[in-house]
Image: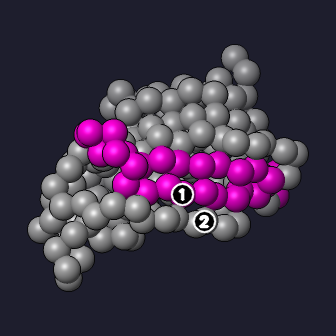
Amino acid sequence: MSDTARARTFLEQVADGTAAPHELSLTLGFKPLSFGEGTAAFIMDTDPVRHGNVMGTLHGGVLATLADSAMGFAFATTLASDESFATLEMKISFLRPVWRSTLTASANVVQRGKSTGLVECRVTDERDRLIAHATSTCLVLRGSQAQGRGLGDGTSA
């Protein structure tokens, strides 16, 4: 099995419930929907009481966390077994307010180089309207830099 296939296997186990989800995803209530080579999608039902800001709409930090998780998992599908990554930069544009909705965060790796990568994410609602768009620049870590930062070791994306 290739290294990237091992990473996808772990991600698929998270999606099907045979590997424990990360606590943050449980706290916010989002879950993995699908994974592929350089892609990941998460789904989330929003609630203005649980996820709202003081103005009553979905808090931007919740949208950013959803997008960041999808982008991180998409990038993780490209990693070799001795690699990990760190996010260098993330940008998100909030395009439409949300109250109560089912959101899908669909991320894909735009460019994967030897040391850096670019990932983008579209967050859409159940009517396929674009709610937010995010990008992330990732730094590939190897050797001692990657130790303790792998998938499934409690410190994964």
Q: Is residue 137 magenta?
A: yes
Q: Residue at x 48, y 47 (%)?
A: 122
Q: Position of residue 90 (x, y in %)?
A: 60, 65
Q: Residue at x 87, y 45 (%)?
A: 114
Spot the residue most to the left: 49
Mark 1 and 2 residues: CB-CB less than 8 Å, in contact?
yes
In which quadrant of the rendered view does residue 42 lie? top left
The residues colored magenta run: 116-144
Disc nearer the start of the sequence (1/2): 2
Q: Quadrant of residue 151?
A: top right
- The relative height of residue 109 versus residue 26 in the rendered view (above or below) is above
Instruction: Say above or below: 101 vs 5.
Output: below
The residue shown at (60%, 39%) is 108
Q: Is residue 4 magenta?
A: no
Q: Amino acid at mark 1?
A: Ala
The kind of secondary structure the magenta stretch mainly shows is strand
Element type where label 2 sits in the image: strand
Looking at the rendered structure, the number of numbered marks drawn on it comes to 2
Question: Looking at the figure, which quarter contains the N terminus?
Answer: top right
Q: Where is residue 46 drawn, in percent x and y?
A: 21, 55
How many residues crowd mark 1 within 10 Å: few (<14), some (14–19), many (20+)? many
Horizontal placement of 155 versus 5: left or right?
left
Kind of residue at badge 2 = Met
Q: 122 or 82, which is in the foreground? A: 122
Q: Is residue 120 visible?
A: yes
Which residue has dot 2 on it? 90
Q: Which residue position holds label 1?
A: 134
The furthest residue to the right: 114
Q: CA distance from mark 1 to mark 2?
A: 7 Å
